[in-house]
Amino acid sequence: MEGAMEELERRSRFLSSLIQKKKADEVEIEEEHHDDDKQQLQPQHDPNLNIKVRAADMPIALQNQAFRCAKDCLDSMPNKKLDSKRLALALKKEFDSSYGPAWHCIVGTSFGSYVTHSLGGFIYFSISKVYVLLFRTAVEPLEK
């Protein structure tokens, strides 16, 4: 189990380094256009919620929507008790309706995964002690 956690952490650091490099490139491009637009490159979330992005390959606007949807769903849960299935379903439905089908969501306090996702359709984040993996896969038409 510990080996799997180390591997997950290693992969997370690798993805984060790639994302940071990409964000740095985006910031350089944005600086050329508008200095005042730089704030939009950072995820907007409430620091009291303790949201941490573990790994992401997703536009900031979609990340913010995932944070808002997760927060709203967690806030609406009776007695603030985690219902993982309900949160996963809410995120999946939100993203399926807003951005098309084939979104998948895994929610829990302890899980492992290895997934293939569409470009720009992956985020792994935590809110307090709840971990959320949201990703999109390609939809292939059926051959007849």
Image: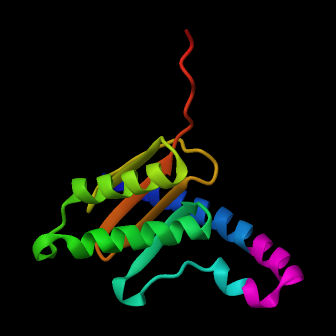
Residue 70 sits in quarter: bottom left
Q: Is residue 38 visible?
A: yes
Q: Can residue 3 be seen in this view?
A: no
- Give the residue displayed 34% in from the left and 64% down from the top: 131
Residue 84 sits in quarter: bottom left
- Give the residue displayed 46% in from the left and 82% down from the top: 45
Front-lying residue, 9 or 141: 141
Residue lying at the far right of the rendered structure: 32
At which x and y percent is residue 118? 59, 44
Q: Is residue 33 magenta?
A: yes
Q: Quadrant where the C terminus lies? A: top right
At which x and y percent is residue 114? 45, 44
Q: Is residue 5 above or below residue 42?
A: above
| Left or right, residue 21 beside residue 86 | right
At which x and y percent is residue 30? 81, 78
Residue lying at the far left of the rendered structure: 79
Residue lying at the far front of the rendered structure: 97
Q: In this view, does 9 lie above or below 43?
A: above
Q: Does the magenta stretch include residue 126?
A: no
Range shown magenta: 24-37
- Give the residue displayed 43% in from the left and 58% down from the top: 6
